[in-house]
Image: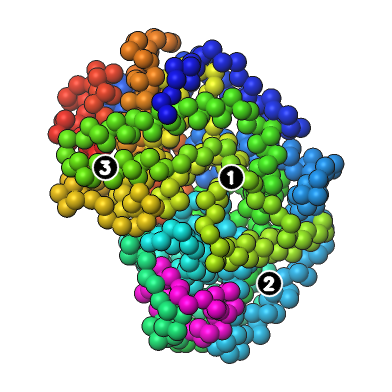
Amino acid sequence: MAPTRREFAWGALACAAFNGPGRAAIPDTQRVGASGIDLKSMDRSVAPGDDFFRYVNGAWLRDTPIPSDRGRWVEFTRLDDLNSQRNRAILEAAASSPRTPEEIKLGDFYASLMDENGIEKHGLASLKPELARVAAVTSPADLARALAQLSWDALPALLGGASAMPASPAASNVVVDIKNPTRYLPILTQGGIGLPDRDYFLIENNPGFAKARAAYRAHLAAMFRLAGMDDVEARAARVYALEERLAHSHWTRVELRDPAKRYNLFAHTELAAKFPGLDWDVFLQAVGFGQLPTILVGEPSAIAGMAAAAREVQLADWRDYLAYRVMRGFALAAPKAIVAEHFAFEDKTLAGTPELPARWKRAGAIMDRAMGHAVGRIYLASYFPPAIRARADAMTRNIKLAMAKRIRGLPWMADVTKARALAKLQAVRIEIGGQQPQRTYEKLTVARDDAYGNVLRAARVDYQHNLDKLGTPVDQGEWQLVPQTVNAQANPVMQKIMFPAGIMQGLFFNPNADAAVNYGAIGVVMGHELSHHFDDQGAKFDEHGALNNWWTPDDLAHFTAATEALAKQYDGYEPLPGMHINGHLTLGENAADLAGLALALDAYRTSLNGKPGPVLDGFTAEQRFFIGYAQVYRSLSREDYMRQALATDPHSPGEWRSAEIRNVDAWYASFAVKPGQKTYLEPDQRVKIW
Ligand SMILES: [Zn+2]
């Protein structure tokens, strides 16, 4: 259905944002003018054509300290901090005066994590049985069972994003079958190393990686010491060697992006022959895949490497490896000394963060993972008024229409491919706010005096929740994000894009601001997510969400050449001395930003209905569109955080996301950018995909 004129009436609606019915109304106090531009953050002494990022954000970059409990400071993390204050109010209210059985659980769980004295007094008591369990591994069957348990005991890294590593070296999970999206499949994937990526173990000539390797060895020894174990240096050396061996067989982050290469179906009975070394019967039974005829294997050579290590590495080394894995999970709800050691390595060494976040922030982050949909139910009622949802709804519909128009107008695409692309676009559903209905937690048992037990039980309930999907029809409503998450997501297999309530605020979306800046900010995010269904990987899925090539060879060749040009452009950027952006790791995200800019600008122009956009704060409408885009991606990173992001994050750092405007002709026109200026690209060097 075509959107009506009324849906574009931005300025006039009175906004009820942040005055919802809940008890936890904490407003975002950031103030910007009616143009939506944060004027005092700009640096007008910089020419837009020389450095647009600093022209828009220069004063902010100069005057803003990175908070001491953060490795980077961007609009995502600023809003995450704001939401964590709201979550705190929600959780404290649940702990002191719960209204429903679910709020009792929320409150008791949170109170258990906040009970610093209780946790300190309890010491290692609840860790001991877990350590005893892995110390009793004396046979290949025991090892298989203990490796399986790692998948049961790990809370999914809802907040860790794409760079999070599964806890187990053979991580089991349940996914939608990408070749037959009406059913679920069990999957095994690589994981289980304690540095952020194989590169950290294997790349010799990066001083930052070398520093992290040395710190990891020291950290392993420190954790063993804290667990009361002896001979800690030797144990650390052996665990390090085992992980380094696993890292050798791990796939690279670029290889992990290719869904076709990661689709390897094996008969249950084949695994033992294809991947010898692990007691597969015991392992598959223990992960809950015992009765299943076929198993998907994400990275066969990595699983083969893990299985060979199961046989060839002595059990004593595996016992220490498992003990460290247990300690790492325990650190979420442990006495101070263990929390401090965990933080010193994970956040200080690997991300440069100077200070441990406040206890309530850490507890809130765990609650987001353990019972995030229950927190989200209250968050939605308190912070997501219907008017915001309606606006977001209207904008996404306009972006979708813009995409249809772009596809129809592509000069290089054959009609037959266009018809498939349009059918695929039509099938994409747009969901805003949070999963409906929200997930509930009836099966979770919570005890107010058992923090670690609560964390383990939440992880196991979550894993069972996934196992229970096998054999059932695919739940089309499911989200991986919770409503308070400051992010958005595209799922080409489920054929939908999702915008949690958490991102519909701040510089992304300002209900009191003029439309241009909102289209440049959240509008580009919407176009970004929609276009993920058509990025270098998303484009491999057809109009039914199945991995199936629908392109003519000529069209595919053109599309691939255009995306390769973008990869090459990003390979040229060097955020840290000697460390470039990986153009192929970030290709999907960079392509999505480029498409998002084109789609959101089209949609904004359509929304004007033939009239010129207003001039506000001295900026034309299209200038504000681009400023809105660049101010959303203002970002400050500590060096260690940046190194980790460059190695693992499929998104380019904010400064280079904002550099995408170099490919957009309208940006040159808006700011009269001339040849010779530093960011100028000749027209034939500007990448165009859609
Ligand atoms: Zn993306």
Q: Give coordinates of residue 1: x percent, y percent.
A: 42, 29
Which residue is label 2 attached to?
Answer: 227
- What element does badge 2 sit on? loop
Please identify, in this view, whether the residue under mark 1 or under mark 3 is nearer the observer: 3
Which residue is label 1 attached to?
Answer: 435
- What element does badge 1 sit on? loop
Q: Which residues are magenta?
A: 278-304
Give the quadrant of the C terminus: top left
Q: Name the colouring of the figure.
A: rainbow
Q: Splitting the image into 4 quarters, where does residue 15 fall?
A: top right
Label 1 CA crowd tier, 10 Å (few <14, some 14–19, many 20+): many
* Residue at the (45%, 51%) spot, across then down: 494
Q: Give coordinates of residue 352: x percent, y percent.
A: 51, 49
Q: Give coordinates of residue 201: x percent, y percent.
A: 41, 67
| First-in-chain label (2 vs 1) | 2
Which residue is label 3 attached to?
Answer: 419
Q: Give coordinates of residue 194: x percent, y percent.
A: 51, 65
Q: CA distance from mark 1 to mark 3?
A: 31 Å
Q: CA distance from mark 3 to mark 2?
A: 62 Å
